[in-house]
Image (cartoon, rainbow, N blue to C red):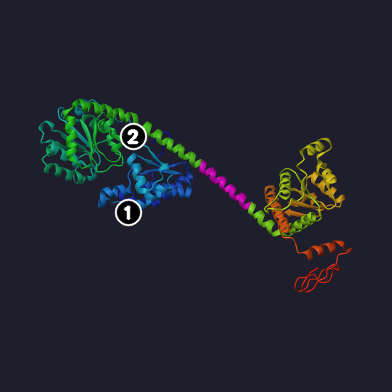
Amino acid sequence: MANGVRVVHVPAGAAVPLPKESLLPHMAEFTSFVKEWCQRQPYDLIHANFWMSGLVAAEVKRSLQIPFGITFHALGRVRRLHQGSADRFPDQRMAIEERIVREADFIIAECAQDREDLLNLYAADPSRIKIVPCGFDSSEFWPIPQAVARSTLNLPMGDRLILQLGRMVPRKGVETVIRSLGLLRDRPDQAAHLLIVGGESERPDPNLTPEIGRLQEVARAIGVADQVTFVGQRQREALKYYYSAADVFVTTPWYEPFGITPLEAMACGTPVIGSAVGGIKFTVRDGETGFLIPPQQPDALAEKLALLFDQPHLKQVMGQQARRRVQTHFTWEQVTSAIAQVYENTLSRATVCLGQLAEIDRIDRQFEAAILAMQQARRSLSGAIAQAADRIHACFSQGGKLLICGNGGSAADAQHFAAELVGRFSRLNRAGLPAIALTADSAFLTAWSNDIGFEDVFARQVETFAQPQDLLIGISTSGRSPNLIQAFAAAQRLNLDSIALLGGTGGDVLPLATEAIVVPAADTPRVQEVQILVIHLLCDLIEARLMNPPPAWEVYEELAREAAPHPRPLSLGARGEAAGSVPLLSQGEGARG
């Protein structure tokens, strides 16, 4: 149609004329075509106009995630309120409109009343409603000198001329204008002629447009038929002549979602008298560009018409102010700029939302991977963790200390582990447990690695600080760090027990450790996450043992095993007591020694 604009004709239903009230059954076919089209020709945004197009847009969004907005132009509940049984749209309309209001990314309200109706009747989210009025094309409507316009249309020069232009249906309130003529007829100096433009054909045929026939009967009944001319339908290029030829444009509908004809009349420099409803309240400034009156009030209309006819200068000033108002607020350039801004904001939010969805999906995947690693560790490491807790507890019981080391994140874990033991993990009122993080002495680490070599920084500290009862704990995700390998080799040379907290295959540290807890994961972050949990589990188990020490007989039994030159089997009686295998223990029925 124009640069950047393509019109796509959608096959839906039979190729026969249909009233809009009968279109809903064909929307499924319409939607199917649009979905297929959008898959072949991607779009960033859909702007639907009217509720049935909104239904299509909502379905497309649900399938293809294309954001959409809606301009309703009229709302079913408002229409039903004013027209009652005369409203022939299906009852499903209201439920469909509710869905559209919930799912639309933006809603264009054409005036303040439209916004209020969306909020009050449909519980719309106010943050998604933007008021953008309809507009007019300044290259299509402009003032033409009244004499030129009337001459072009073959209209009498001296008559007071009232114009009514629009659809010929009862709710447009044309009857109100005709009845106002009857009231003006009682004032001979206020007589005027009414031109009514509209209908289904260029001839005012009551058979094609029943409302024309009804209005003709009204005019005859009140004696003003000679003051009313039904013009019939006219092409748009002729409308500016009708607007310019009139002294005043009148539009008195019962309700009007927006109403474009007042803008067109004002663009031609013609004052407007309109019903104080819907968009007319928004476009016409009462007492400035015309007058606002209650709907279905012929006497109020007659009074305002008489005022304008009595004061030609007021009519002229209102016409000038009307044109200034529409040029300031309602040109298509201004309207489309406002709508384009709504598009940009919507697309920006959609991009952010898609980015957030991608991020949330990534977060979910990371959580799932961490949970899987935890589950696998739970199945395979419980025994090793318990044995490590036994060895650490034995170390503390014998007066030993922990020497803990690691690199990078494992260095932080080593300090974390030591801090939990020296301080507290979760139990109050316990003594500190001796644990040294070999990674915490930055002066020694930097000096030794600079002067001698980084591979020996932990081995040097093990050789310096270790006592026979001490325990080395090394943390590594791979088990391949040279300084960890050297530290465990030094522990072996000193006959020092060691525990390695590793990942993957365990690396070269694994065969050097007295015990090992190897996290069954290859991904470094997953290994680190499990290792932190293992550290917390060890702290919890150790504190639990300190707060709930084993029975005295178990302690003595352990001492006996350590004193014996060779391991001896321990048999358990029916009540769980150790039976006679250790000479240091004597047991009776009522006491343990």
Stretch of the chain drawn in magenta: 352-369
Q: Is 191 on the left-hand or right-hand side of 390?
A: left
For mark 1, what is the residue? 91
* Near-viewer residue (164 or 140): 164
Residue at figure coordinates x 26%, y 26% from the top left: 320
Please report whichever mark, 1 or 2, sits nearer to the chain's N-terminal start: 1
Q: Is 348 on the left-hand or right-hand side of 562?
A: left
> Does residue 142 appear in the picture of this structure?
no
Q: Amino acid at mark 1?
A: Asp
Quarter of the image where the N terminus is located? top left
For mark 2, what is the residue? 135
Residue 574 among magenta residues: no
* Near-viewer residue (363 or 398): 398
Number of numbered discs present? 2
Residue 354 among magenta residues: yes
Relative to residue 98, is residue 258 depicted above or below?
A: above
**Percent coordinates x, y for residue 160 in the rendering:** 16, 30
> Does residue 322 appear in the picture of this structure?
yes
Q: Main secondary structure of the magenta part?
A: helix
Residue most extreme to the right: 565
**Percent coordinates x, y for residue 38 in the rendering:** 46, 45
Q: Amino acid at mark 2?
A: Gly
* Near-viewer residue (556 or 452): 556
Distance from the alpha carbon under mark 1 to that under mark 2 = 31 Å
Q: Secondary structure at mark 2?
A: loop
**Percent coordinates x, y for residue 452 in the rendering:** 84, 37
**Percent coordinates x, y for residue 81 in the rendering:** 28, 49
> Which numbered circle lies on residue 265?
none
Q: Residues within 10 Å of mark 2 (few under 14, many from 20)?
A: many
Relative to residue 146, is residue 51 depicted above or below?
A: below
